[in-house]
């Protein structure tokens, strides 16, 4: 393997060359096989190199790869929109395609703003989000993101949208019941809306299950309904960022379904294209979209949005998900995986918390389980465990937790096709890596 490269991402650190994918596995050019324990970055929901999906993409390739959306309607984009509406909760019935998660979040916010203008609400522009959170890296999405290391270099260039604390229930040492704790955190939104002036607040954006910034953090059940109520009370639009949680990852098509919530707008990507195409979608209530179109149109759009090749991939992905019952499998395998991860706490005292929903699961390292004090950052635990697992043929995804300010969490989020035997195979490698870490 040559270390020479003209290419850069976050760092130079070159990895081995990827050769091919096969289900939950990725194989590098030396023939070494890795379990994709994080589906890349929670992307490859139906696994790698699915032959039926590849055949459908190739069939579209032979017909037309691109037709600009203002010049032609295409069947793949119409069919994918219809399928998406059919799979999302009732009321979410208009679809706008994009090519990624940051684009989806920004599109959701811009749709909200244009809708507010049609209602004569010119003063509404503030979008409240949470700390910690991750909503993307473009300027608009970054401004909503509560993750300090990513914001700091660009802070002067950001508007500085208001934030409330996301529930970090595993750190709470109060004597509240789960229900009261959920309400306590949700009511932070009410306080913030009043502080900013309801007439200025356009929307509230949240990840229903935290992703990269918090490590699969789920709020108490009472949180979700209370947030919806508060948004309705003040006419604030509720945007769910389901870029990571959408497309079946948590055991429902949208995570919102676990709590019976219908958001006003939902942003999706990652598992929606599932690695077969750069693809994302904004799914919104028609009552928001129609007035915007009536008033002259949505002043927003990306060149590649809705192209037939990406949409044919997305359609094949959703069909495969349905045919194979992958969303139910995610719910079932999520239970198995959570049981396995909880068992790790008996063996490794430095695992302080295990959490998640469906196949979006995580564990967090701590120095002390009683205080939940994070591990000393100089131990560089988050890099070390990832490397120990990688050497042994398991890919996991880690970030500094608590908004990037401290601690280490590890996301375990394999493709939704995973079987019990494959979970067992993954756990053997993970335990081996944790043993090596503990030494
Ligand atoms: N929102 C969430 C919840 C995400 O997890 C991500 C990506 N990690 C994004 C938005 C941004 O997506 P992308 O990287 O595709 O722009």
Image: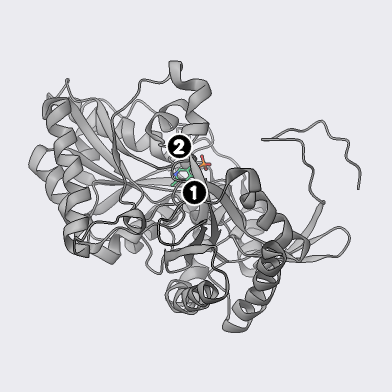
The reply to whether residue 23 is in sight is: no
- Residue shown at 84% from the left, 34% from the top: 5
Q: Quadrant of residue 182?
A: bottom left
Residue farthest along the left direction in this orientation: 233
Q: Nearer the viewer, residue 3 or 269?
A: 3
- Residue shown at 61% from the left, 46% from the top: 64
- Residue shown at 22% from the left, 64% from the top: 178
Q: Quadrant of residue 88?
A: bottom left
Q: Position of residue 350 (x, y in %)?
A: 55, 63
Badge 1 residue CB within 8 Å of ligand 1: yes
Q: Residues within 10 Å of mark 2 (few under 14, many from 20)?
A: many
Q: Which labelled disc corresponds to residue 212?
A: 1
Q: Nearer the viewer, residue 8 or 174?
A: 174
What residue did someone put label 2 on? Answer: 147
Q: Secondary structure at mark 2?
A: loop
User: Mark 1 near mark 2, Cβ–Cβ under 8 Å?
Assistant: yes
Q: Quadrant of residue 164?
A: top left
The reply to whether residue 93 is in sight is: yes
């Amino acid at each position: 393997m040559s270390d020479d490269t003209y290419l850069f991402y976050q760092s130079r650190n070159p990895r081995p060359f990827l050769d091919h994918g096969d289900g939950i596995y990725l194989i590098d050019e030396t023939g070494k096989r890795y379990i994709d324990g994080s589906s890349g970055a929670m992307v490859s929901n139906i696994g790698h190199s699915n032959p039926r999906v590849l055949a459908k993409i190739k069939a579209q390739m032979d017909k037309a790869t691109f037709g600009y959306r203002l010049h032609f309607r295409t069947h793949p984009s119409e069919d994918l929109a219809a399928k998406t509406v059919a799979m999302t909760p009732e009321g979410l019935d208009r679809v706008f395609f994009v090519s990624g998660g940051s684009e989806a979040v920004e599109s959701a916010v811009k749709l909200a703003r244009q809708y507010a203008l049609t209602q004569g609400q010119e003063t509404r522009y503030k979008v409240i989000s949470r700390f910690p959170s991750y909503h993307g890296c473009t300027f608009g999405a970054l401004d909503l993101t509560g993750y300090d290391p990513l914001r700091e270099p660009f802070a002067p260039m950001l508007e500085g949208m208001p934030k409330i604390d996301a529930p970090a229930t595993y750190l709470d040492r109060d004597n509240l019941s789960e229900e009261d704790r959920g309400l306590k955190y949700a009511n932070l939104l009410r306080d913030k809306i009043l502080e900013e002036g309801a007439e200025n607040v356009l929307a509230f954006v949240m990840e229903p299950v935290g992703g990269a910034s918090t490590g699969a953090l789920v709020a108490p059940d009472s949180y979700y309904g209370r947030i919806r109520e508060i948004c309705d009370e003040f006419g604030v639009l509720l945007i769910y960022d389901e870029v990571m949680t959408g497309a079946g990852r948590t055991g429902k098509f949208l995570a919102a379904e676990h709590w019976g919530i219908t958001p006003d707008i939902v942003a999706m990507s990652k598992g929606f294209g599932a690695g077969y195409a750069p693809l994302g979608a904004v799914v919104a209530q028609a009552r928001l979209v129609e007035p915007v179109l009536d008033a002259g149109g949505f002043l927003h759009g990306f060149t590649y949005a809705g192209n037939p090749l990406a949409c044919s991939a997305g359609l094949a992905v959703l069909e495969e998900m349905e045919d194979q019952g992958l969303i139910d499998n995610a719910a079932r395998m999520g239970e198995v995986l959570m049981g396995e991860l909880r068992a790790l706490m008996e063996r490794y005292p430095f695992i302080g918390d295990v959490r998640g929903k469906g196949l979006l699961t995580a564990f967090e390292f701590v120095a002390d389980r009683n205080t939940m004090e994070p591990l000393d950052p100089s131990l560089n635990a988050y890099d070390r465990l990832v490397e120990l697992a990688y050497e042994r043929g398991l890919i996991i995804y880690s970030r500094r937790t608590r908004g990037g300010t401290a601690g280490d969490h590890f996301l375990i989020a394999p493709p939704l096709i995973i079987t019990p035997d494959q979970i067992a195979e993954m756990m053997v490698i993970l335990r081996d890596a944790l043993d090596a870490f503990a030494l």
